[in-house]
Image (cartoon, helix red, strand yellow):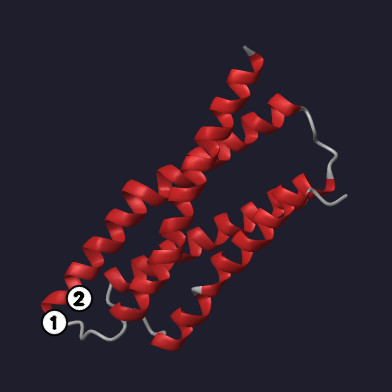
Amino acid sequence: METNYYNILKFLHIIFFTTWMAGLFYLPRLYVYHTKISKKDKSYQTFITMERKLMKYIMNPSMILTWVFGTLLTYQISVYDQLWLNLKFVLVFLLSVFHMYCARIRKSFEKGKNNKDESFYRWINEIPTTLFIIIVFLVVFKPN
């Protein structure tokens, strides 16, 4: 029974981590296209709606549930002193900070006060990808 509990936690952690990452990959890309549109254009409001719904209905719940199921998994397997796991938590914390930064950017677009250009968003779009690759490496290879 304990194996089933572990597998259920792992399954849910993977599902919510995947949906969270999808949002973290997509939102900065939306910002790239959003910067190209005049604030007076009707499409500007469409982007605001898309970004808000992505954050509110997909990214926020997915981030929270990733943390919940990841923490429960850690308690389930009782490995607190593993280097790979501690590094993973630090990187997931950094992803969470990036998530909050993206939320702040979203609000600046909503207020019409975005002052960053397209190339800035192209650069920050690489942050979640880089962290994702390192996290997956740590989980698969579990270096000590």
Q: Name the residue under label 1.
A: 41
Circle 2 — which element? helix
Residue matched to label 2 = 44
Residue at 28%, 86% (x, y): give it.
36
Q: In this view, does 98 lie to the left or right of 73?
A: left
x, y percent for residue 53: 27, 54
Pick the front one: 144 or 95? 144
Q: Tag 1: residue type? A: Asp
Q: In the image, 61: left or right of 84?
A: left
Percent across and percent down for residue 142 are 79, 48
**Is residue 40 among what the camera can see?**
yes
From the top left corner, tell me how far across and down residue 74 is, in percent: 70, 33
Q: Position of residue 126 (x, y in %)?
A: 54, 74
Image position of 106 with respect to 33: above or below: above
Q: From mark 2 to mark 1, how far is it between C-alphas?
A: 6 Å
Q: Residue 15 carries which label?
A: none
Category of crowding for the residue at label 2, using alpha-carbon neighbours closer than 10 angstroms: few (below 14), some (14–19), many (at least 20) = some
Q: What element carries label 1?
A: loop
Q: In which quarter of the image is the N terminus?
A: top right
Query: Which three-letter amino acid code belongs to the residue tagged 2?
Result: Tyr
Q: Quadrant of residue 91?
A: bottom right
For the point 65% across and 54% down, the residue is: 136
The reply to whether discs 2 and 1 touch (Cβ–Cβ < 8 Å) is yes
